[in-house]
């Protein structure tokens, strides 16, 4: 059955124009994700400082994930109605507000207020996740996987500068430790909004498009959609579970904050640096092999963490955790774009991201409790079932034999 296409598609940008759009979106993603990288480096440690019950140390991280999950549906549906630019600006405003709230919480020594700030910053990330879909819409089928991976490659900057920025800005406003980090979060959110002003994006879709296309239940029953969703959920869930617990586990093993920040820095580089080649790997070897390689790397991460708690173990495991996440997430996003027509994109993207970041939120909430209550080994073993299910679904699916994807018409 052929999928419906929009009645009045806008003219597609040239190849050079598409690449310019993708590069600008990569820059916006880099700035937005650097603020998330700062938060990933410090939020669990600040939670440990402020929380009376240390089992709640990772609650700010979990609420960051909750905010991201909560924003995914409104972000996708809002952008389907008003366009990408207005939606991304809304996300930047929410993120800057969260930076202000979290900074004030440190001055007030308020754990609940800090949790609110991380929730707001996480909500802005729910909007920023749409950058990869905006890149897909600017690219033709042959360039789409590379466009998605290039936008995610903007996260390399976040891996390089996020933890480093956290290190030098934590003492910016003495005697309040880490307050300067949130001043940087505000600046980065405004920087992303400013760069977006100079980015040419498709116009907003016509009104009524949210109700167009097939029912959502029909779309999510597709084999390709199921594989894409499971791969995305496994990758984000495993990454969130292990990364959230890592800084606290390292400090518990006697390592200093700079050591934990360095491990997180390499983890974030592992998440985004492969994006320069992931699209090429998909084109060369196919989606199935890339997805299975991502699952294998997550299992290797688990094995390294189980082998010991040396600094080299933390470093190598978190690096592979990031690379495995990248292969699963880029592959899953590429596969997802084959399952819907343009007028269906809002509801499909909203449902997909809600499920993925919902899994990430549950993993982040569980991470601290598992670490404090049962230990580092249990954190590692908890990720195995999700990764095994995603790998099995990918193995069973004959991705190459599916019908050709529908023509992607820009609305």
Image (cartoon, rainbow, N blue to C red):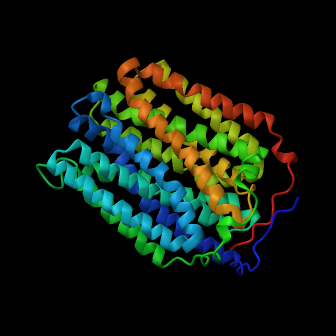
List x then y, in percent, for residue 151: 56, 60
Q: How many marks overall?
A: 0
List x then y, in percent, for residue 4: 80, 67
Q: Is residue 119 left or right of residue 222?
A: left
Which image quadrant: the C terminus? bottom right
Looking at the image, can residue 164 be seen? yes
Q: Is residue 10 left or right of residue 105?
A: right
Q: Is residue 210 left or right of residue 272?
A: right
- Answer above or below: position of 300 versus 3: above
- Answer above or below: position of 384 versus 291: above
List x then y, in percent, for residue 407: 80, 66
Q: Nearer the viewer, residue 161 or 199?
A: 199
Residue at image point 18% right, 47% down: 177
Q: Nearer the viewer, residue 215 or 386?
A: 215
Q: Nearer the viewer, residue 66 or 167?
A: 66
Q: Residue furthest left?
A: 175
Which image quadrant: the N terminus? bottom right
Q: Nearer the viewer, residue 237 or 309?
A: 237
Residue at image point 39% right, 32% down: 246
Looking at the image, can residue 161 be seen? no
Q: Is residue 399 left or right of residue 77?
A: right
- Answer above or below: position of 230 versus 200: above
List x then y, in percent, for residue 248: 33, 31
């Amino acid at each position: 059955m052929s999928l419906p296409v929009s009645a009045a598609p806008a003219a597609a940008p040239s190849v050079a124009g598409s690449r310019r759009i993708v590069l600008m979106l990569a820059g916006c993603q880099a700035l937005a994700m650097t603020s998330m990288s700062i938060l990933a480096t410090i939020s669990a440690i600040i939670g440990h400082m402020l929380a009376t019950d240390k089992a709640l140390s990772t609650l700010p991280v979990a609420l960051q994930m909750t905010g991201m999950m909560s924003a995914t549906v409104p972000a996708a549906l809002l952008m389907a109605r008003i366009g990408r630019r207005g939606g991304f600006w809304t996300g930047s405003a929410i993120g800057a507000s969260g930076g202000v709230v979290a900074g004030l919480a440190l001055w007030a020594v308020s754990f609940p207020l800090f949790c609110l700030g991380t929730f707001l910053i996480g909500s802005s990330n729910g909007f920023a996740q749409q950058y990869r879909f905006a890149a897909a819409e600017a690219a033709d089928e042959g360039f789409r996987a590379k466009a998605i991976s290039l936008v995610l490659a903007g996260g390399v900057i976040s891996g390089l500068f996020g933890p480093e920025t956290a290190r030098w800005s934590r003492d910016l406003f003495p005697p309040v430790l880490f307050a300067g980090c949130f001043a940087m979060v505000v600046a980065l959110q405004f920087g992303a909004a400013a760069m977006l002003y100079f980015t040419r994006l498709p116009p907003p879709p016509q009104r009524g498009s949210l109700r167009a296309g097939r029912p959502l239940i029909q779309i999510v029953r597709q084999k390709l959609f199921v594989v894409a969703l499971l791969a995305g959920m496994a990758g984000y869930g495993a990454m969130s579970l292990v990364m959230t617990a890592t800084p606290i586990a390292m400090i518990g093993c006697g390592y200093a904050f700079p050591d934990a920040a360095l491990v997180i820095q390499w983890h974030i580089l592992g998440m985004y640096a492969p994006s320069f080649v992931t699209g090429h790997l998909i084109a060369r070897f196919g989606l199935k092999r890339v997805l299975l390689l991502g699952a294998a790397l997550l299992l290797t991460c688990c094995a390294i963490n189980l082998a010991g708690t040396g600094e080299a173990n933390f470093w190598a495991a978190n690096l592979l955790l990031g690379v495995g996440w990248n292969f699963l997430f880029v592959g899953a996003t590429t596969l997802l774009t084959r399952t819907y027509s343009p007028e269906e994109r809002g509801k499909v993207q909203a449902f997909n991201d809600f499920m993925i970041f919902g899994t990430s939120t549950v993993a982040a909430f569980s991470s601290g409790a598992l670490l404090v209550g049962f230990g580092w080994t249990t954190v590692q073993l908890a990720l195995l079932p999700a990764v095994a299910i995603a790998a099995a679904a990918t193995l069973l699916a004959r991705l190459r034999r599916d019908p050709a994807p529908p023509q992607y018409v820009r609305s």
